[in-house]
Image (cartoon, helix red, strand yellow):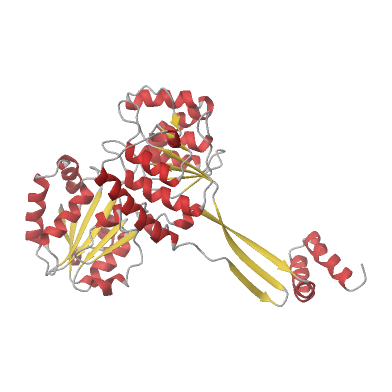
Amino acid sequence: MKHYELKSLTEPDIDRLCKRPKMDFVSVFSQVQPILDDVEKDGDQAIRNYTKKFDSVDLDSVSLNPEELTVELPENVQSAIDRAMQNIYLFHQQQMPMDLEVETMPGVVCRRVAKPIERVGLYIPGGTAPLPSTTMMLGIPAMIAGCSTIVIATPPDKHGNVPDSIIYIAQKIGAKKIVKAGGAQAIAGMAFGTESIPKVDKVFGPGNQYVTAAKMILQNSDAMVSIDMPAGPSEVLVIADESADPEFIASDLLSQAEHGSDSQVVLVVTKTANLSDIEESLQKQLEHLPRKTFASDALDKSFTLVVENSEQAMDFSNRYAPEHLIINTKDAGELTRKVVNAGSVFIGPWTPESMGDYASGTNHTLPTYGYAKMYSGVSLQSFQKFITMQTVSEEGIQQLGPVVETLAEIEELQGHKNAVSLRLKKLNGNG
């Protein structure tokens, strides 16, 4: 990891540290667009073709109904999934908003009610290992919200099968379909709909640059679909001082770095921290990681920043806006109150990122690439839309109607004014 000292950096230097590696959207978009066009035109057959091309898998069927399948998980695996699902359910169920009703003036009542997004698509990346955790993180709030159609898409293994753990969770959340495909073609299948895949209204889930590009293109197309958020490679920023255990800090950095060579890993330490011990532990633990190559590549592109105190560390973190923020300092509780920009925060020595990634209850689908400055992570509200309603009584329109008439006149919208004036005349016996 590269080393910097905050006191030696200029403002432009700090801005450069906060920037993520540039994504070549022009090139990626040009590769993704033909895939989307083919799926829109040829449906299931296009998905079969691209799955064979990219994953070397011949699909007999593009999708399956999880309710028609029987799966048996090892007892310890099922128990772990059930416990995680319970925690995630409890946290998200408490996010259910109450309907709002306000009488803004006598006779004028305004309401706001939450309704589920009816059809949602959940993208679960595959690659080197299945991700039941992401299936839970997206599927549970969709179930709680009451989404009537839940579609899951995930890359199949080399035999064309979907992992039992994902099927098990799909059954628990009431998913209608599992699409056996990954990449841009899976996103397109859910966005447009095909012979075997229901069209969805919103697409969720992380993925590589091609998945991200597909989501970004489709939300601005005639597919009429929205997305949870744009996303780049996963990232963590760790704040540590002299009270932090070097082995804990090293493990937190590596747990993020092993995601992939494009992961972002940032260590911000106070000048009193034992940086040499952290670096020594980092190297020792790295040697024993099965995904050592990925982690090593990520660390080579990452950096350590030395600051004077934890307040400076927090200021830099807010500027960087990390997806995951770990605060392992003696004043962690106080620093937490100063968090402005972060996807999810992990506080104190006993809270590694892994807890939130899997089972504490918070959601791990979070904004990356600096988008934590303006996006929230996935929550129950991500699967809902909010509708406003109003009821105006005779008293209400008599009091507020003249206001509306005046404003409509200013905007030269006579029809708007007439809709009120006619009613007022009726009430006054002149209609």
The quarter of the displayed image where residue 206 is located: top left
Q: Is residue 314 above or below residue 298?
A: below
Quadrant for the C terminus, please: bottom right
Q: Is residue 372 above or below residue 21?
A: below
Seen from the viewer's position, the closer of residues 154 and 345 is 154
Residue 400 spot, x, y in % from top left: 75, 74
Q: Residue at x 57, y 38 (%)?
A: 222
Q: Is residue 310 left or right of residue 243?
A: right
Q: Is residue 274 left or right of residue 58?
A: left
Q: Residue at x 47, y 32 (%)?
A: 36
Residue 230 spot, x, y in % from top left: 41, 48
Q: Is residue 168 above or below residue 412?
A: above
Q: Residue at x 30, y 46 (%)?
A: 78
Count every numbered label the image shows and give the total: 0
Residue 424 seen in this snapshot: yes
Residue 418 spot, x, y in % from top left: 83, 63
The quarter of the displayed image where residue 64 is located: top left
Q: Is residue 216 left or right of residue 290?
A: right
Seen from the viewer's position, the closer of residues 78 and 422 is 78
Residue 24 seen in this snapshot: no
Seen from the viewer's position, the closer of residues 299 and 200 is 200
Residue 213 spot, x, y in % from top left: 41, 40
Seen from the viewer's position, the closer of residues 247 and 320 is 247
